[in-house]
Each structure stands twice: as C-alpha cells, then as structure tokens.
Image (tube, helix red, strand yellow):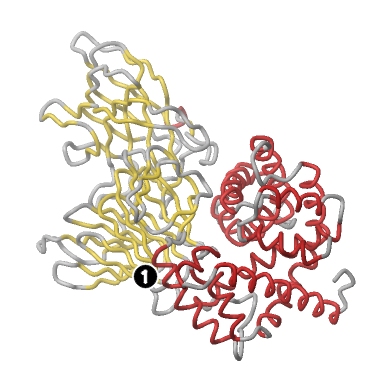
Amino acid sequence: MPETNLDTLLARLVDETITEAEFEKLERMLANDPDAQRRYVHYIDLHADLQEVGEVVPVKTRSRRGAMAGLFALAAALMLTLFFLWQAATPKPLVQVVDADGPVRWLGASGLADTELQPGKRLPGGTLETLTPGSSIELAFDDGTTLVLSGRSVLMISLVENQKVLRLRQGNLSVQAEKQEPGHPLLVFTPSSEAAVLGTQFNVKADAFSTRVTVNEGLVRVKRIADSQVQEVAADQQVVAALDLDTEFTATPRRKTVTHWQSELPRDQLQGRWKPGAGLRAMPHLWKGTAEEPTSPILLYSAVFDPSVGKRSPVLLTESTRLTVHGRIDRAHPVSVGFGTNRARGGPIGKYAMQGVRVTPDKEGRFSLDLPLSDFSPKRTRFPSSPVGQEIDWLWIQTVKVDAGLVVERVELGE
Amino acid sequence: MSHPTTDFVRCWTQHQNEVARYLHSMVPRAADAAEILQDVSVLLWEKWDQYDQSRPFVPWAIRFAYLEVLKWRQKHAREKLVFSESLLEQIHTRHEEEAPVMEARRKALEGCLEKLNEQQRKWVALRYGAYGSIKASAEKTGVSMHKLYYALEKIRAQLLDCVEQALRKEGWSDA
C-alpha cells in the first residue's frame, strides 16, 4: 500500500476518527514492517509536538524549542487567543499529588468531589480539604514548590496570571516555596492575613479569627487584614495576625523548644467533646487508609490534642521523652496512642503510633498510661524510623471501631 | 537535603511528557493512554527506591510503562482499537531504536513549522491550539470537518518530509 494511505490512516488515528475496519487495516500495514512502524512512531511524535506547540507558544516558556520567528508569530498570536479561550473552558493541571494520608477530598470547578488522590495524580485549580485531624496531603507545583495540608483544613489553590494563590480558609498549611518569578510572589490568604513569599519554608495555622505564620527559612511579608499593617517575618520568627486588634502584631523570635508539655483543656483540644471537670471525650470520625495501604473506611473514636496552639514553645522529642495519658474508660479495651511531628524548624515529617495498648480501668473507671518514645513506631515506611529530634505537632488517643467511653483528662510529655 | 517524594515529583514532572508520548504510540486512544499514564506514575513512585539516579530516567520509566501497556492490553484485548501484543512489542522496539534521534527531529520541526504558509498555520492553530479535537474545531469555527481533516493530513505529511530532509542535511543516517 502506498505511503499516502498509511498517512491517511495515521491521520484518522490521531484525530480519533478511525473506524474499526481501518484500524485493522492499519495494524496489518504495521505488522512486521519496520519502515511503516518508524513512520507510525514519527507520526505520533509529530502529533504530540503539535499539541505541545499549541500549548507552549502562548505562555512563552518554550526553552527547549527556542523562539519562533517571522510569519509564525501570527499563528502564535492566534493560538494565544484560542489557547486562553480553551483554557477558560478546560481546567489545566496545576499541582501533582505527592502523598496522601487519611480522608482527603478535592473539589474542582465543576463541583465534583474526588477522594481518590493517589501519588502522581494531577489536579487543576480547586478546593482541597483534609477531613480529620490525622489527614494530610502533600502536593507539588511544576516548579518544585511543595505544600502540605494537614488536620481539618480547607485550601483553595489557583494560578492567576502565572502567580500561585493559596487561600487557607482554616487549618494547617506548610509551604516549601521554590524561588518565584520577580513580581509574582506566591500569595497565601487566610481570613485574617495575606502573606507574600518569593522562596522560603514556612508554616501557617489559621482559623476564622487569627493566623499564625512561622518562618523557618527565607522571608515572608505578612499583612494583617484588619488594619493593613505589614510585618516582615524572617527565618526563625513568627507572627500572629488576628482580626482582634488588641492582639499584638509583631514578628517575634520563634520560641526556644521545650521538652515538657502538659495539656490544658479546652485550649489544646483539636477533636473531642470537652466537659469541664471531666476531660475530653473521644468522638467518632471515619478513617480510611493511605494510597500505600488502602483500607475500607473504619470508625475511630478519638480525642486529639494540639500542643503547639497559639505562640507556645515547640515541644522537642528526645531519647528520654515519655508520654503519659490519664483518663477514664468504661471497660478494659485496647486504645491507640500516636502523634504527628514536624521537622525541627520545618514542615510535617512523620506520624508515630502504638496500636492496641491494653487499658484496664480501676474501680473508679480511671486509667493511666506511661509510654516511652522508643515504643512508638512510624505509621509509614517513608517516615524516619525515630521521632527523636522532631517537634510534636498534634497527638491522639483513640479506640478503633468501638466506643468504649474513652475520656482523656490529661496528657503530658516529659523526660 | 531533598526528600525522596520531592525528587520523584521533580523527575516525573520533567519527563512525564516523554512517557506520555510513548504511551500514546502504544495505545491509540488518548483517554486510554492518559489512564495508563496515571497507573505508570503510581507504579514508578512505588518503585522509586529501586531507581538508580545515576542512570537515565526515561528508559527506566518506559520499561514499566511497557509492562503497564501489556497489562492494560490483557484487560482490553477484545475491545476495538487495541494493537496485538506482537505489534506492541515491535513498536516498543522501534521506539528504542528511534529514541536517540527524536530530540533532533523535534528541533528540526521548529524550522519546518516556520515554513508553513499562513493558511496552514491557521489550520494547525485550529486543531492544536484551540478546541482539542478536529470535530470540536470544525463545529466551533464553522469550517468543514472534511476540509480541515484533509488539510491537516497534508500538513503533517509535509512536516514529516521536511523533518526527514532536515535530518538528512545534518547527516543523520536513519533519516
């Protein structure tokens, strides 16, 4: 068969108009014919190149191909216009999932929810939700900027004129920003602050009323929305931007780490129902496994604490750290105890747990646990084997599937 | 010190287009190729600790991509538009042979695109810059689909011939 016929079939193939009979004919032409196969490979590659030209020319990032000149500029201008029309209708992937743990959800512009966020999946602009205190997801932009959303958090991600814009409605966000283009800083908005960064590592904790920004590397410019005051927050500094103007808005040195912490309720509660004089009652929530170890959703009853709330000193874990828990439980039952950690002066790094710790209540229904740090194991193989040297971010005590009436009165970390 | 996940994402982001091109040649339907690409990215992430970073990423990735294609083919063997396993093996081999010259071909294409006339560039822009499919382009612009289809077939053939000539001039023996 002449080459033009092969080209006709290849054209129909790439344009996805080929019929079944034509496809069979194409397969026969390609079988055992290296020349035809070579033409096929080149044709498909040309098609991919043209697709790339159609996308690459308008955004002027054609480093590999160099600049098109002369008359082609006219076509480029046309493609630019059409590209933006197309872009408006077709969401373009902005970020890629690096890792996800626990219930997380992505809501795209169409409003459809996606809860299967495996590593490698590419996502367009939209709203990301981590749904439980233990949920987390790490995403990467194409320039290598990464972000980790954790806890009960809601984050909108968008790209506006080549500028990354993150809107943290609530929760915890850790950002490792690669150097951004001059004039296009990465922007982080919360209900009470606006932050602009050109390249740095920083953590943001926000609720409806206040935002704490802790900078570990680089420099972040933070604006308090309530009065538009601006603070430059340098490495090892933090600032709290609150809607309440009585709260001091000054970048201050990050507090030195401590090795002792004792819970104070209700200030430190992240999940559970607090009863004055009683403690934090474990409350139910659904959990599902990771992409590495998927499980069917299971019901957990958890009391969750946040030792790092407000401007408190970070709690450093050492070889001799022990975790003690005092509480009440209806009957003898296994509990799980665990915690999430941050790198020293950095973002989230790991989760460690002791599963199935048998708890037996005394005559008054009370129990206490005294657990050395060395008894805790990493929840994922990719986490460091030991949490020593890391800072504690949050911790949980829970029963699995069964409500055993768990109430946590006090938690303590110390040597 | 960079994190393995960050290393992987950087590497994958840099090279996934190459893997996507390969998959598209093995699996003609774009939607199928995209689905396999997702699976390949997960598989590569799982195997990342086995990757020797002193060696090129793309051939390593394509080895796994080929296995994923074969797995996909087993599941979809009875469907339309699925190449036989024997042909897939031959195309895979052709890919390996052609890999060294592909970058030169792409560079040559830049010059060839500049040689297109105004009308031809308009057809290319309609097909590749706007609506993403020949049917959608035709419907949106009111251009006859057959006319656009025919024009694109000629343009692609012209571009391929131009690339071949350019490579011959540069001394590529297999061009």
Q: Residue furthest top?
A: A363
The image position of residue A26, as x and y in percent, is: 75, 53
Percent position (x, y) of residue A120?
A: 53, 49
Q: Residue at x 17, y 28 (%)?
A: A279
Residue B82 percent location from the top left of the image: 68, 44
Give how far across and how far down residue A231 sits, in percent. 25, 71
Viewer-proximal residue among B91 and A214: B91
- Quarter of the picture containing the C terminus of chain A is top left
- The reply to whether residue B1 is in sight is no
Total numbered circles: 1
Relative placement, left or right, of A188 versus A180 is left
Q: Residue furthest right?
A: B173
Residue at x 43%, y 79% (from the top left corner): A182
Q: Which residue is mark 1?
A: A160
Q: Which element carries disc 1, helix, strand or loop? A: strand
> For this rendering, which residue is in front, B38 or A96?
B38
Q: What is the quadrant of residue A274 in the picture? A: top left
Q: Residue at x 54, y 37 (%)?
A: A381
Lateral position of residue A263 relative to residue B19, left or right: left
Q: Is residue A321 visible?
A: yes
Q: Decide: is A106 above or below A52.
A: above
Q: Specify the subunit that label 1 lies on.
A: A
Vertical position of residue A93 compared to residue B130: above or below:
above
Amino acid bearing label 1: Val
Label 1: how many Cα within 10 Å (few below 14, some 14–19, many 20+)? few
Residue extending farthest to the bottom is: A70
